[in-house]
């Protein structure tokens, strides 16, 4: 992680679940069942705790005793100035810049209630390689997202397929919660998550933002 990104993105890491149309469509049948009854009408948020922070070129530990680990390619939005009840039209003026996020997770049973044990293992949120200033990103809703495992393309999508745009997310979240300078919005991972294993090299590429690389390593046995 570059020093500029480290300094600019020092706040809370807010994740957004179910923010790609393809993923939401896959889950619609579940939302018709109890206890949900209908799809979410507001952003489904979760927090990546400080221990999850990781950087470009750093290892991600494959925890002991688990069967699956899944990377989550996502666009990261770094807040540049305080946002409280901002409008959609004004929302992007609160963005300092953009970065790549790989939001690692264990498979989850519920998207409505993302599990802390699945989301918040050490090193499960890689950011990088740098902060690209907002002025250099003409349209955050026209960026391609690609996931490579050991050099092979395994997942591909576009921010054009988000349920809520970056501006909509900032406006809706800031209705009830102030976003502060340094906070990061992880704007959602697309459908089609894949599994990785120790020894794998995982890369996320977003057009105009570069490529974030991490290696998966086995957890050391306790002594």
Image (tube, rainbow, N blue to C red):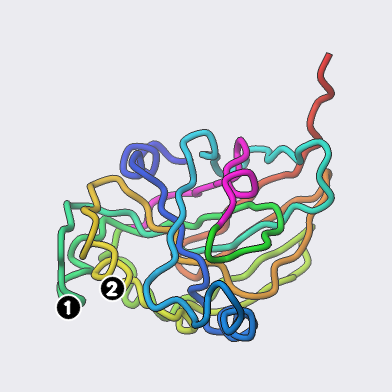
Residue 129: say if magenta.
yes
The answer to which image quadrant residue 137 occupies is bottom left
Q: Residue at x 66, y 66 (%)?
A: 147
Residue in the foreground of this view, choosing between 1 and 70: 70
Q: Residue at x 39, y 38 (%)?
A: 6
Q: Earlier in the sequence, mark 2 or mark 1?
A: 1
Residue in the foreground of this view, choosing between 223 and 197: 223
Q: Residues within 10 Å of mark 2 (few under 14, many from 20)?
A: many
Q: Tell me the number on the disc at residue 59.
A: none
Query: On the rendered image, what quadrant is the C terminus found in?
Result: top right
The secondary structure type at the circle numbered 1 is helix
**What residue would you read off at disc 1?**
89
> In the visual, does 201 lie left or right of 210?
right
Magenta span of residues: 114-132
**What residue would you read off at disc 2?**
167
The secondary structure type at the circle numbered 2 is helix
Q: Where's residue 80, x and y in %?
A: 23, 52
Query: CA–CA distance between discs 2 and 1?
Result: 7 Å
185 vs 50: above or below: below
Residue 100: say if magenta.
no
68 vs 93: above or below: above
Q: Where's residue 42, x and y in %?
A: 37, 73
């Amino acid at each position: 992680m570059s020093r500029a990104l480290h300094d600019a993105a020092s706040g809370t890491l807010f994740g957004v679940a179910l923010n790609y149309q393809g993923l939401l469509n896959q889950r619609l049948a579940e939302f018709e069942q109890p206890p949900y009854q209908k799809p979410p009408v507001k952003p489904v948020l979760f927090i990546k705790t400080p221990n999850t922070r990781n950087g470009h070129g750093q290892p991600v530990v494959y925890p002991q005793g688990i069967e699956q680990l899944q990377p989550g390619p996502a666009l990261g939005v770094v807040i540049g100035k305080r946002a409280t009840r901002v409008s959609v039209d004004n929302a992007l003026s609160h963005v300092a810049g953009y970065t790549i996020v790989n939001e690692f997770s264990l498979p989850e049973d519920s998207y409505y209630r993302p599990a802390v044990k699945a989301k918040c293992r050490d090193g499960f949120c890689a950011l990088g390689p740098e902060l690209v200033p907002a002025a250099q990103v003409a349209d955050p809703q026209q960026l391609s997202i690609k996931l490579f495992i050991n050099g092979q393309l395994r997942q591909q999508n576009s921010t054009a397929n988000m349920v809520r745009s970056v501006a909509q997310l900032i406006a809706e979240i800031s209705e009830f919660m102030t976003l502060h300078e340094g906070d990061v919005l992880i704007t959602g991972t697309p459908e089609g998550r894949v599994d990785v294993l120790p020894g794998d090299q995982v890369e996320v590429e977003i057009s105009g933002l570069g490529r974030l690389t991490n290696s998966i390593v086995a957890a050391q046995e306790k002594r």
